[in-house]
Amino acid sequence: MLADPLLSLMDTAYVGRLGSARELAALGACTSIFHLAFNAFRATTSATTSLVGNADTEADRRQIVQISLTLGIVLGIVVMTFLQSFGPWCLSTMGISAGSPLFSPAIAYLGTRSWAAPAVLIITVAEGAFRGYGDTKIPLLASLAASLINLVLDPLLMLPPLCRGVQGAAAATASSQAGAVLVYYYFLRKRRMLPKKQRATTTTTTTTTATTKTTTTTATSTTMKTFTTGTTATSLSKKKVVMTILGANLAMICKQGSLLLAWAYATSRATRIGSAHVAAHQVGLSCWLVFALIQDGAGVAAQVLLTKVIKDGSSSSTYKKVRSLVLYMIRFSFLQGLATTGALLLASPYLPKLFVPCDVVVQGHLKSLLPHLAWQQILVSLTLVIESLAIGGSQFRLLAIGTTFSTVFAIAQLRQATTVVDIWSRGIVSLFAGRLVTALIGVACVLRKCRKERDEETMSSVTPKQLDIEVYPNHIPGY
């Protein structure tokens, strides 16, 4: 999950050292476009994780991974084609028109990095596949590989002698994402998580015919080639898997799309306020995303654990386990958010000079903004973890509806913002507060469903004689 935000953070750090707020402001608009374009399909990660984790056989898992990867490639090509064709329009929605001084560096970054869209969608699906297998080490390894490649290529392509500026940053990011795809492909093949290729086998069939009057035997040998695969026939048809994946993703894509619309509007509003404000917004967003996605790791664990408890446990014990898990994760998310707040407060005095050493105006906006970002981490941690619990309980439709209403309310707050601090302290806080309330309702629905199943199982296990005695304790059978 950290791959794309870390790459954006590295680009932000290097672009901020080019000496002009113009490039940094252009990068801010482009980063929001990519977050909107790519993260709208991050729901594929959660859907793949749940489907792979709940599959009954290894053959089913391989089929789910194969179809999900195919879907990811198709979506990636669609996103790439859209960004290549409608890049200027996307920038205009962010407040950067063709006549703006920000347009030239922004379109260069957008056009170059959009070539990596298929790679990003493959990474998204592959991450979900390994999560479903309970393996989080490979996604971490792929993220580290991408970060290392980007760290090496950013200065080589941006600074002398090549001096490609923001376009060099985009090329470095795209190359690093391609490197992450290679890491995933190697381990997918090594761990046999993909369907095996068909291989030809030769079989010989012998038939013998005998007559009653004469002793005549006819032997016929037939040689034919058949194709077998390394896996047995799966119990899931491809059509059913595709429909399951699309159904699980539809509500989550709506949820993620409305959420990212709020982020895009926040960046658009910052762009219209001024280049110094959007430059500070870009730095703040890059730092915020890294801390938020670190905290979302606990949410991933909560989702996987809740799915496992609901699948494996009996109805009588599931409610108790789910309730215990929910209470534990709420306490953990609060403490995690508190620790992240402390870490960001300690780093706040040093971040402005680290990212924009040459622009005093942007540094001033960052010094005012960073304390707000720090204290929001408690709200962010609670929201991400509790929302993951609701996703683990399959409350997809509720989350989609609640997030949409939260987005509408947040945009109403953002319309009134006049500074970058207003954008984060009013609009973004409203967005996450609405999401938290929705997630709490979703978790309450999961608990209610588990309790209902427990009560139904308890009632079904009671014999008529026991029920008669409990209802009529003085009743004597036979009288």
Image (cartoon, rainbow, N blue to C red):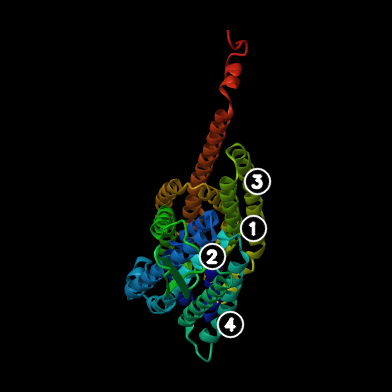
Q: Nearer the viewer, residue 387 or 238?
A: 238
Query: How many other residues sit within 10 Å of disc 3, few (<14), some (14-19) or many (≥20)?
Result: few
* Mark 1 vs mark 2: in front: 2
| Residue indicated by mark 4 | 152
Find numbered disc 4 in the image and state the secondary structure of the residue it sits on.
helix
| Cα distance between the residues tagged 1 and 2 | 25 Å
Look at the picture and state if 336 lies above or below 361.
above
The reply to whether callout 1 and callout 2 are in contact (CB within 8 Å) is no
Find numbered disc 2 in the image and state the secondary structure of the residue it sits on.
helix
Q: Quadrant of residue 109?
A: bottom left
* Mark 1 vs mark 3: in front: 3
Dot 1 amino acid type: Thr
Q: Quadrant of residue 40?
A: bottom left
| Residue indicated by mark 1 | 340
Query: How many other residues sit within 10 Å of disc 4, few (<14), some (14-19) or many (≥20)?
Result: few
Q: Position of residue 236 (x, y in %)?
A: 45, 56
Dot 2 amino acid type: Glu
Mark 1 / mark 3, whichever is N-terminal: 3
* Mark 2 vs mark 3: in front: 2
Q: Position of residue 162 (x, y in %)?
A: 50, 90
Residue 275 shows in the view: no
Mark 4 / mark 1, whichever is N-terminal: 4
The reply to whether callout 2 and callout 3 are in contact (CB within 8 Å) is no
Look at 45% across and 75% down and name the residue there.
116
